[in-house]
Image (cartoon, rainbow, N blue to C red):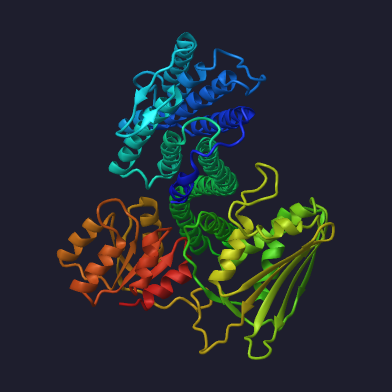
Amino acid sequence: MAVCLSAVAALPVASVKLPAMPHIAGIYGGAAAMINFATFWLLLSAPRPSRPLRIIASAYLFAGLMAVLHVLTFPGALLPAESVLGTGNSVSWLFIAWRAGFPLFVVWALMNEPAPRASGPEPGVSPILVALIAVALSTAVALAAGDVQALVPGPAGLQFGSISTVGANIGGVICAVALALILHRRLAGRSLYLWLVLVLLAETVGVWLSTRSGGRYTVAWYGARAEGLMASAAMLALLAAHYREVQARLDSLVVELSRRTDALQAEMQHRERAERMMAQSQKLEAVGQLAAGLAHDINNYLQVIAVRAEILKRRLGQPAESDVEVVQRNVRKTEHLTRQLLAFAGRRQLQPQRVQLSAQVPEFVTFFRSVLGPGITVELEVAPDTWPVKLDPSELETALANLLTNARDAMHGEGRLQVRTFNLPGESGASDRVVLEIQDHGTGIAPAVQERVFEPFFTTKPPGKGSGLGLSQVYAFAKASGAEVQLTSEVGTGTTVRLAMPRHVDTASPAPTPQEAGPSPTLAGRVVLLVDDNQDVLESTSGLLTMNGMVVKTASGVTEAWALIEGGLRPDVVLSDIVMAGNADGVELALRLRKTHPGIPVVLASAYSAAAADATAQGLTVLRKPYDAAQLMNLLAAPRR
């Protein structure tokens, strides 16, 4: 609108002559050349430019070269009253090509819209090559024409007196065609074509004024060139602003990419760590499966040894008691090791019991002294009035073993190790606690590492010296027991681990455990159906029961046992292993008897099985192998139905 209004305002004075300043043509041509070349470069710098964009870029290359030729051929632009190249009329022929060529390139680009982004070599002739050929041909024609002049009649009532006017008129017509195509194809909404409208409109208005001005150095002649430069400069400013915005976006994308790269690297490290943990978990799962099988078999062997030792003790009497006691003590130690293996492998269910730390801790530390080595001095400070706690004693021993082992390693096998237990009364409504504290005087743990010491598989020990599961087991045991675990450490001074366990308040007098029970009850004459697929266990247990006066019927599996019952056998009690060969196990036998013969009580025995926990949850009596004679007789005397 501003361009059109300025043209209308200048129309009354368009033909007014102004001082002849031929050097203005040089300034105009030089400025136009710089603007057009810069625009060409910016357009061609677009990533993967489309064919229409390349054609428009070539239009600016063409215009820039023609502007240079305009300066060289215009008389007085560079040399006083002379042209550097050609004659005075050569500039008119070049002006025709300039004014007609630029909008022709725009029309060519419009004929190629819409065009997809180039993904490979573009089909057709190169627009840049076309621009160069057009410049060469225009120059050749202009130089060959020499002093040729033509009078070309214009519209009705108008006469054009120079070749320049003819060229301007032709260029104006082509500009009008390009403008019509932009509007027809609704491309004015795109930034590039919107600003091309300004350039083409400025060219058209300049032509319109020039046809009425009558020649050079008029108001229209100077004004048309000023408007053309301003329009071209506006296009260049648009592109410069656009590429500046693109650069700013690119910078922000680089920053964002860097941030995301850092996040991706952190995620990759997290995944690598998770994969390592998964690999460790898979190894642990394999260890667990192996441990389950080993525990089952080893405890069956221990069961045979324990029962045979009891039989030998009864047969030989006093002379064999001391030897049998040694065998039974080592059976208990071996059974404890299998529990440790299962606990490490994560295959053991917690079995909370009332525990007196004042008795349990000294006994375990005494047992563990040989593992600590002769260079470690253990100082025990156990309060005799320590309150009872409720936890799994086996898990407590595992936690103690892990803590004592870590303390030994931190002191490199030499130093003073303090183990304390004491009561911690609750204050301000807090519950009473019993504290187990282990303090070493070793190397200590760095603050940056202390936050990770309870993570599974994290260890600061050399490869092969630690699994990274010790403190994670302590942490898991503490949480499962309702306890709190706290670690404090100082490099060069030592480390203290404190377990604060809730005080257990007895609500009833504890029933005597099988080990605490009195003499075995009289079971003479009672019929027992003994079911086990291990022949040694079957024979040993059968012999022990027979020595106690019981009548024993044996079966090597569930199928055989059920056949005896269906055949009319009505035992006073059924003693069955849980895990046996075949499709059925001891739990299934017990549940079937509960349904069909509820009067027959069942005692299940297990060396190790995940089904033992399910059996206990269903109210079945479960006796863990290896069991001793007193435990077995007490359960057989008063089994639950």
The picture places residue 48, in percent across and down from the top left corner, at 45, 31
The correct choice, above or below, for 626 with respect to 237 in the image is below
The correct choice, above or below, for 445 with respect to 604 in the image is above
Q: Quadrant of the C terminus?
A: bottom left
Q: Quadrant of residue 451?
A: bottom right
The correct choice, above or below, for 394 with respect to 141 in the image is below
The picture places residue 480, in percent across and down from the top left corner, at 53, 70
Please name the residue shown 40% across and 74% down the image.
635
The total number of labels drawn is 0
Please name the residue shown 60% across and 32% down the image.
31
- Left or right, residue 318 beside residue 361: left
Q: Quadrant of residue 599?
A: bottom left
Residue furthest left as drawn: 567
The picture places residue 38, in percent across and down from the top left corner, at 57, 32
The correct choice, above or below, for 152 with respect to 187 in the image is above
The picture places residue 484, in percent across and down from the top left corner, at 63, 73
Please tell me which residue lies in front, 133 or 527. 133
Please tell me which residue lies in front, 144 or 387. 144
Can residue 447 be seen at all in this image of the molecule?
yes
Please tell me which residue lies in front, 217 or 184. 217
Please tell me which residue lies in front, 301 or 525. 301
Please name the residue shown 59% across and 57% down the image.
330
Can residue 546 be seen at all in this image of the molecule?
no
Residue furthest top as drawn: 144
Q: Quadrant of residue 555?
A: bottom left
- Left or right, residue 459 beside residue 156: right
- Left or right, residue 364 beside residue 187: right
